[in-house]
Image (spheres, rainbow, N blue to C red):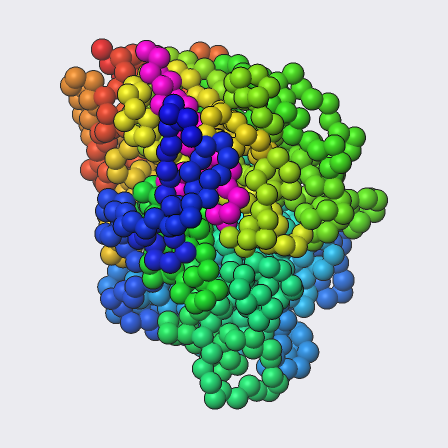
Amino acid sequence: MSAMTTITAQPTRSLGAPVTTRLTSLRLGVALVLSALLLAVVPALAGAADLPDPLATGPYAPTEIPQYLAGTVNLQEPNSGGGGLTTAAGAATLQVRGSAWYPTGKATPSPLIVLVHGNHSSCDSGSAPSCTAFKRNDRGYAYMAQNLASWGYTVVSVDQDQLMYYQDGNMGKGMHQRRLLIAATLDAFYKANQEVMPSDADNNLGSTFLGKLDFTRIGLMGHSRGGDAVTSFIDYNRTRPAPGRRYDLRGVISLAPVDYERRAPYGMPYMTSLPLCDGDVSNIQGARFFERSQYIDLTDPFPRIQFAVQGTNHNYYNSVWSADSDDASAADVACGPAAANQDTSVRLSGGTTINGATPSPSTPTLLGTYTWATRNLGDPALMGEQEKVGLATMGSFFRRYVGGETGFDPYMTGEVVQDGVTPALPASACPTSANGARISCFDRMKTAYFAAPAEREDVIRPDADTPLAASAVGTSITGSGFANPYLENGGVTPKPATTASGIDWCNPEPDNFAPAQLGVAGLPTAKKACPLPAAAALGGQNGIRENGPVNQSYGMQLALAWDHPLDNSGRPATIGTRIPAADGDVSGLKALALGAGVNFFDPRNPDRGTDGLWNPQTAEQDFTIALTDKAGHEGTVAAGSPKYGTALQPTLGSTTARTHVILNEIRVPLTEFGAQGVDLTSVRKVELRFGGAGMPQSGSVQVADIRFQEAGGAPQVLADSPGASGPATGALTAGPDPAALIAATPRAAASPALPDVLGIGGATKLAAKCVDTKAPKAKVTSTSVKGRWLTLKGTATDLGCGTSRTRAVKAGSVASVQVTITRAAGGGKCRFVKGNGKLGRPMPCTTPIALVAKKTTAWSLKPSGRLAAGVYAITVRAIDASGNVQAAKATKLTVK
């Protein structure tokens, strides 16, 4: 060993308790395997012990309605290729029904969570649509519903057992019917919150929910086809034809979803969960939603979240499905059942079996999970490891954004892992079985958080027009020393020519999702294919469900490969860009983040070998991230450090259906650079370096979306219940308001081909009562600018009821007051003041970003930082409880 060599040891995660680390290797350009393990206790992230436990039970006793009946609904499934109904059975009148849980004795209205299961068998016995005994797929989320009800949430799980018989099985897959049924459910419970429901064969809610529900706080979760349905409902709800009610969605989750409608969700916090051992939706289609949604609306003020979980399959998130079958039972070193892979399977259990229960009327395949008798109880003692992961991730999301409980924020952003040893999962959800403990809890989950524009500064975002030339801050992307990322005998033929820098771009989103259904020959063809293994090789496009490419993250990305650049040129391969002075102050943000994924099939990457098929620590990639300030001070970090996540670990699995390339997040706290002397108020350059000293000398990765993000200080988005002790009640008190976005969106025209079947008739017609038709009014009563600190105060009033609209509300109820503070940027663009007082990047003036004032009738607004000198326009508008919006005029403000 040369005396000049500096050895830096980075802790990796133990395969046991999350508070220990295991030193496995030193990076010297080649791996030097130690002959002994160095064990050390590492202090947890400051405050990690104080993080809330999403599996803990709350103060309320859940009351359960095993089957609610809320009227009927007329559904139809249009022909997805155009024209009339798909079949004679494409339209039906069905009961609006399911199961519900609510907090017993809660004095204030509860937020409403709606759960939507996916496609499964309809019957335990008999034949659909009139089963002798229905499957009750809606009961499979009882474990989560009971927990949320104990914390003050009302949870409704929609029964679609009958609907599945009528869905279009070709291309539409029942999505139109599902969004109508979601609307029917919300309409029915809205009515039940307003008045006593009738008691008959189709109704049993009575007065149970009268005045008990908070319709300013609604969350949706959809599983499998339900995951596609809730993303479909987002768009439908936003533009729902009059007079249908539009609902204030504060958070939407797609769990192991399909992607038949190719939506891009926006307008509220959105989360997708990816089970990496999924045996049904094996091409992990949820990653597409996360990628597509990021730039679909550059003014959308809400974050996107992606959780990718090792060892989870499709069915075990639903206990009814878990008792029926194991969708990932096929042979695979990492994802196969434990019986076949005793020493390598990392599969999580799907439930705890109670012996002695007698299956009836037939015997399902239990496979060590729930029994027939226990599959729908929701008993916390019965939860398997996968249900615990589901409750930890989905429960945390709902409580953070629907309830506004900010104590869950570090789970959402990924900040919880920044000490390199504290897992993204709470200790209560860390698996303990032989399979579960085979890999560390830290390595179980990858978190990707894409912040809202007001809390994000994009740096390198592959542009549709000039993906290899222009950065997001208007400077040139520079690069050198890279090798062609495409393989000579790979799945992209002919092999693309090598660019001048070696860097290439790609987007694996296919032109046609399912070509055969459209009469198009061949496999799905990408807009510009990312590097692929050969068709017959592991991960090849011929061998995955629907023949999709192995890269599951559909969107613009950079393909980077390097092959011993130090030997070839004496320098590492580099890609970077200059940061203009106007964008160089990132001191108000927390992290430098980027998306990255390793092309496991490229021989230039570390060989996974036998152990690498199941052990994510075996073949990790690495490169250097460098940040330079105005004075030339440079800070560098190793991207592969566990402190920044596990995006550079290889995919697990030994079969094509279980191997994936997915962009996950590398998140580096900016304090890491500040501690090395970088002035975070004057950053001037971001650079990634590959194949440098002490790093892997060759490799192939995908990279996208380099950005600074996450506002410092207290959370800003939907943060209105400090800590984690239960949901806030009523309209938003801080941050951007989803209701305001919906109210400002034009409705679609009524469509005879796609009728809105609810809102004016049938079970959901409201009794005649006073309705609000007039916009509220807000005004500024005082403006104070001291030392460039701005304080605004004002009042707002609502005139209350009119007589011409159908949405019943309480008279005189102002929901929120929104303030837009704007400075002209030229060329039809404006810069909007953010919550921290800083100006955002130039954006179209027609798409403003508003700040929500504190309180309503007597409101105030004070940005947390000083404003820059200049001339501003201030616009104040009020929104009432029925969505009426004030048309306000701007006033001038000069800050010196």
* Residue 566 in view: yes
Q: Which residues are magenta?
A: 616-645
Across and down, in percent, residue 759 comes to 51, 56
Does the rendering let one see residue 743? Answer: no
Height in image: 158 above or below 840? below
| Residue in the picture at 55% in, 86% down | 359
For the N terminus, the quadrant is top left
Residue 156 falls left or right of residue 345:
left
Q: How many marks?
A: 0
In reply to whether residue 501 is colored magenta, the answer given is no
Farthest residue in the left direction? 786
Residue 620 shown left or right of residue 16 in the figure = right
Locate residue 856, reporting x and y percent: 25, 40
Residue at image coords 57%, 21%: 567
Vertical relation: 467 (above or below) 136: above
Q: Which of the pair 69/771 is nearer the observer?
A: 69
> In the figure, residue 55 lies in which quadrant?
bottom left
Residue depicted at 34% across the width and 33% down the height: 669
Task: Determine the residue positioned at 43% across, 67% down.
Answer: 433
- Quadrant location, the C terminus: top left
Q: Compare residues 676 and 244 and report the one nearer the observer.
A: 676
Q: Nearer the viewer, residue 367 or 267?
A: 367
- Asked if 275 appears above or below 562 in the picture, the reply is below
Q: Residue 43: horizontal and vertical position, in percent?
A: 25, 47
Q: Where residue 176 sits in the image (x, y, percent)? A: 63, 54
Magenta-drawn stretch contains 635: yes
Residue 304 position (above or below residue 132) = above
